[in-house]
Image: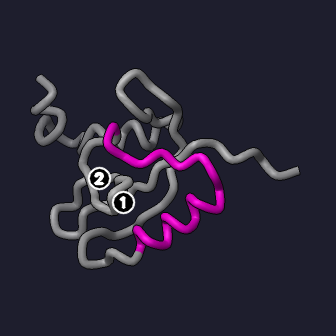
Amino acid sequence: MPRPFTPKVITANALLEGDVVYFTANDGWSREMCQAEVLEDQAHAELRLIEASRQQAEIVGAYLADVKAGDNGPEPTHFREDFRRTGPSNYFHGKQAEAS
């Protein structure tokens, strides 16, 4: 029996900077997960992933990531996605430094 579809967002890396980005409802990219389009239907999610993947001049490696509803928008359900959205871990910079 197939696993039921759970809500997802589309994520990728910005081609030039390498930052983690999220696909928005207006076909753009945001560095903030809270602005990502939440996809509730598998067929629609697959179509949106195709649309996002076509933006090869802007991003690389687009894929669907599981999320759950949170107080400020979608939140990751897997530690890998939570790790990706907080930025590099090799030293204190980027998103980690901005949060202070």
| Foreground pick, 44 / 70 | 44
Give the image location of residue 5, x and y in percent: 69, 47
Three-letter amino acid code at the position of disc 2 = Val
Look at the numbered disc 1 and give the secondary structure of its residue: strand
Quarter of the picture containing the C terminus is top left
33 to the left or right of 31: right
Residue 26 appears left or right of 53:
left
Extreme residue toward the front, this view = 26
Element under label 2?
A: strand
**Whole-Å distance between the Cαs marked 2 and 1?**
6 Å
Disc sitting over residue 33 in the figure: none
Q: Main secondary structure of the magenta part?
A: helix
Identify the residue at horizontal 55%, vertical 68% (top origin). Answer: 47
Whichever of callouts 2 and 1 sits on the residue coming sooner in the sequence is 1
State yes or no: residue 94 in magenta: no
Q: Position of residue 34 (x, y in %)?
A: 33, 37
Query: Is residue 36 shown in magenta?
Result: yes
Q: Which residue lies under the disc numbered 1? A: 12
Q: Residue at x 27, y 42 (%)?
A: 32
In-front residue for pair 63/93: 63
Magenta-tinted stretch:
34-53
Front residue of this view, candidates 22 and 91: 22
Horizontal relation, residue 12 to residue 41: left or right: left
Mark 1: which amino acid? Ala
Residues marked 2 and 1 touching at CB (< 8 Å): yes
21 is higher (above) or lower (below) than 82: below
Q: Residues within 10 Å of mark 1 (few under 14, many from 20)?
A: many
Answer above or below: position of 46 versus 19.
below
Per the image, the residue denoted by label 2 is 20
